[in-house]
Image: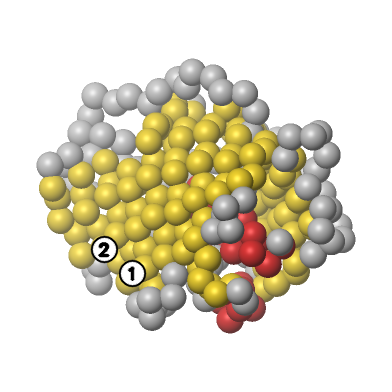
Amino acid sequence: MTKQFFGALIVFAFIFGGCAKRPNLYTSDEIMQEFDPAYLDFEYLTARGRIVIEEANGKTTRGTINLRAKKDSIIWFSVTPGLGLEAFRGAVTRDKVRLKDRLNGGDINMSFVEIADRYDLNLSLELLQNLIYANVPHEFSYRDRLIRVGQYFELTQAREGIRYHSRVSTLHGKVQELSSTSMSDRGGLLANYHVFEDLEGQPFPNQMLLKLTYKSPEGVQIAIVNLEMTKVEISRTSLNFPFQF
C-alpha cells in the first residue's frame, strides 16, 4: 500500500483535517493590471484540515492532517485516518522526503533524485510549497509564455521535462487552476483552487481538488484528492518538527 499511496501522498498529504468552518474569504478591490503573482509571506506556519483520497484501486482514505512548515526549509505533516491513531508522519526538506508508515511499516527515506528515478516525479521543496500555497509553479522569466484572457493571466512554463499551465486570477494574484504534464507522457497533475481565505491580509487556498497521475512499480496510477481548510495560522515563534524512524 505504501508504494501505491506514496506518489500521491508526497504531493498533497501535507494539509488540513478537522471540522469544516465558514472561511473568512479573501477580497480585494484592486485588479492586477500587470503580471505580479502573489506569494505567501511567512516564516513559520501551522495548519489543520480534512482530506479525502481516492486511489486507482477504488480505495478511499479519509482523515485529518496536521501541518507545520518553515518557509524554504521544511514541511512536516501527520496523518490520522479517523481512529485517533497516527497512520503516517512525514518531513520534506530541501534534500529529501521521509515518511514513517505506522500502519504498514513501509518507511521511506528518499532524495528527490531517487523519487524522480522511481516514480517519474520531478519534485522539489519549492515546487511542493508552491502547490500548497497556490503559487505559480516556478518564478516567472522571459522564456515563459504569458497572455491575459479576461480576469486571468494564462502562464505556460517548461522546466526539466515538465510543462506547466497556470491560470492566475487578476483579483488576488494566485493560481486558480494548474495543469502539468510530463513531456514524456508519463505523468501529470491537475489542480483547482476553489476558495481563498484571508490569512492576515493574504489570500490562502481554502479548498482544492487535485488529480495526480504518476508511475509506480505497479504501473501508471491515478489519485484524486479533495482538501478543505479548517485552520491556518502564521507563527511568529519557531516550531518543532519531530521525526524519527
* Amino acid marked by disc 1: Arg
Disc with the residue nearer the chain's start (2 vs 1): 2
Placement of the N terminus among the 4 image quadrants: bottom right
> Which quadrant, please, contains the C terminus?
bottom right
Q: Is residue 100 visible?
A: yes
**Residue 14 on image: x %, y %:** 62, 47
Element class at badge 2: strand
Q: Is residue 4 left or right of residue 201?
A: right
User: What residue appears at the point 52 percent right and 33 percent down from the top-left corner?
Assistant: 228
Q: Residue beneath label 2, please? A: 156
The residue sitting at 20% across, 44% down in the picture is 152
x and y, in percent, of residue 237 in the image: 70, 35
Above-or-below relation of 131 to 186: above
Residue designated by label 1: 163
Judged left or right of residue 7, residue 41 is left
Does any portion of residue 47 appear in the rendered image? no
The image quarter in which residue 42 lies: top right
Measure the alpha-carbon separation of dots 2 and 1: 7 Å
Comparing 18 with 174, the one in front is 18
Q: Is residue 161 above or below residue 200?
A: below
Q: In the image, residue 70 lies at what x, y percent?
A: 64, 48
Mark 1 neighbour class, 10 Å CA radius: few under 14, some 14 to 19, many 20 or more: some
Question: Would you say the residues marked 2 and 1 are in contact, meaning their CB atoms lie under 8 Å apart?
Answer: yes
Provide the secondary structure element on which disc 1 rests: strand
On the image, the x and y values in percent for residue 179 come to 35, 58
Is 17 or 236 nearer to us in this picture? 17
